[in-house]
Amino acid sequence: MALTKLDRRTRIKMRIRKKISGTNEKPRLTVFRSNKQFYAQLIDDLSGKTLVSVSSLDKNVAESKVAKIEQAKLVGKLAADKSKEAGVTDVVFDRNGYLYHGRVKAFADAAREGGLKF
């Protein structure tokens, strides 16, 4: 029987998570994209804590009515700013099973421009 899209993404996600783990010095930057919104978190996997959380539902991003790729770019800049405030510059990028294309790529490029290193 063929895999559904969600099953396929879950398999890819687990394959990635075997290799990637976040620490306090270099947390994991993970993304989630729904049909309408975009979310990102900086996670310390050793202690199991979320250090920074940003999404397209934040007031600054939600007020600007833009396309979804532009929305992901704004979330990427916001993630870079909040992570600088938290004292984090180096991260490990976790695309969460999504292809590195479209909104995920736009987010990653904007986060790099904002000063995150990965």
Image (cartoon, rainbow, N blue to C red):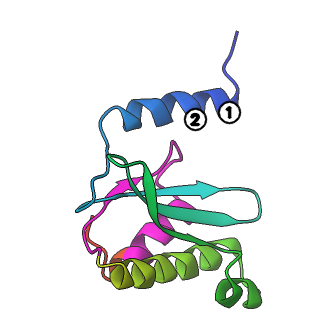
Which range is magenta? Answer: 88-111
Amino acid type at circle 2 is Arg
Q: Choose between 38 and 8: the one closer to the eye.
A: 38
Which quadrant holds the C terminus? bottom left
Q: How many marks?
A: 2
Q: Circle 1 sits on which residue?
A: 5
Q: Is residue 5 left or right of residue 44?
A: right
Farthest residue toward the front? Answer: 47
Amino acid type at circle 1 is Lys
Disc 2, SS: helix
Q: Circle 2 sits on which residue?
A: 9
Q: Is residue 102 visible?
A: no
Could you tell me how far apart the alpha carbons at marks 2 and 1 are, in whole angstroms? 6 Å
Tell me if mark 2 has few (under 14), some (14-19) or many (20+) residues whose alpha carbon lies within 10 angstroms of its own: some
Q: Choose between 24 and 7: the one closer to the eye.
A: 24
Q: Is residue 8 left or right of residue 118?
A: right
Disc 1, SS: helix
Residue 103 included in the magenta stretch of the image = yes
